[in-house]
Image (spheres, rainbow, N blue to C red):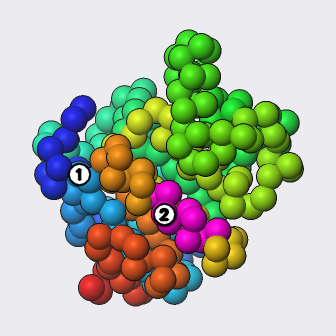
């Protein structure tokens, strides 16, 4: 699935999301239209609770919208029209995820953590190990292959998580407050890495954050307020 640079990668049309507490409807995303282009780095900023993460989860197919459609590439097929197997395949092949909490498996080394998605996808152990080593070298952790998460700093753990998120070469990397637990130095290092990944692989990046400084590193910045994109 190769997309021409600047061609639409993801198109969000009229997406809404509500949650219910008993019979009370709580609208969180109130009607969003958005196009993410191939090769683009896009940040969505805004205060906590405005719907940023919920929107990201819908684009990542982790949550279905209450209303609206999400299209991938030039197919103009709503991804939520896929059956369960096809949706899972789409998520695994097209999307990568990295979150504020890295969710590394504590009993495994950095190398084993990065290998895990490739092994689950059925790739051979030798190929998965070689690609994981290359990625860990790329993120500056070639000397940490055998270290477990407890033996690494927060910034190092987040770089392992980023390496893991791109082992299957996704088209879109979805990042939810990935620098939220990092100091300013590590925050800058992680953002440098995202830019480097984008420039070297062409992966698109959608990052949601309340940190305006982080947003400045992206190609485009949008602001979300009360469930709507306002700029």
- Magenta segment: 186-194
Q: Position of residue 156 (x, y in %)?
A: 70, 54
Whole-percent x, y for residue 113 in the image: 69, 36
Residue 50 visible in the current orientation:
no
Residue hosting label 2: 192
Give the residue displayed 21% in from the left and 62% down from the top: 35
The quadrant of the picture occupied by the C terminus is bottom left
- Tell me which residue sits at (80%, 47%) in the image: 149
Q: Secondary structure at mark 2?
A: helix
13 or 19, nearer to the observer: 13
Q: Does 74 sit above or below residue 101?
A: above
Above or below, 173 relative to 221: above
By secondary structure, the bulk of the magenta-drawn segment is best described as: helix
Q: Is residue 152 above or below residue 185?
A: above
Q: Quadrant of residue 183?
A: bottom right
Q: Are marks 1 and 2 in contact (CB under 8 Å)?
A: no
User: Relative to residue 193, is residue 69 drawn left or right?
Assistant: left
| Neighbour tally class for label 1: few under 14, some 14-19, many 20 plus, Cα within 10 Å | many
* Direction from residue 93 to residue 129 in the image, left or right: right
Q: Which residue is mark 1?
A: 38
Q: Which mark is residue 28?
A: none
Q: How many marks?
A: 2
């Amino acid at each position: 699935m190769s997309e021409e640079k600047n061609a639409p990668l993801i198109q969000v049309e009229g997406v809404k999301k509500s949650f219910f507490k008993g019979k009370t409807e709580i609208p969180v995303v109130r009607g969003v239209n958005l196009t993410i282009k191939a090769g683009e780095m896009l940040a969505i900023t805004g205060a906590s609770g405005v719907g940023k993460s919920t929107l990201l989860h819908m684009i990542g197919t982790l949550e279905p919208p209450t209303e609206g459609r999400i299209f991938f590439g030039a197919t103009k097929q709503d991804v939520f029209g896929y059956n369960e197997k096809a949706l899972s395949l789409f998520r695994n092949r097209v999307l990568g995820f990295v979150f504020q909490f890295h969710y590394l498996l504590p009993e495994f080394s950095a190398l084993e953590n990065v290998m895990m998605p490739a092994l689950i996808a059925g790739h051979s152990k030798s190929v998965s190990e070689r690609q994981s080593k290359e990625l860990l070298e790329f993120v500056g952790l070639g000397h940490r292959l055998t270290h477990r998460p407890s033996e690494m700093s927060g910034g190092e753990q987040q770089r392992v998580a980023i390496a893991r998120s791109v082992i299957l070469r996704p088209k879109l990397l979805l990042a939810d407050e990935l620098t939220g637990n990092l100091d300013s130095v590590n925050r800058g290092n992680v953002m440098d890495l995202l830019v480097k990944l984008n420039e070297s692989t062409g992966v698109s990046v959608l990052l949601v954050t309340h940190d305006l400084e982080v947003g400045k590193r992206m190609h485009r910045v949008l602001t979300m307020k009360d469930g709507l994109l306002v700029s």
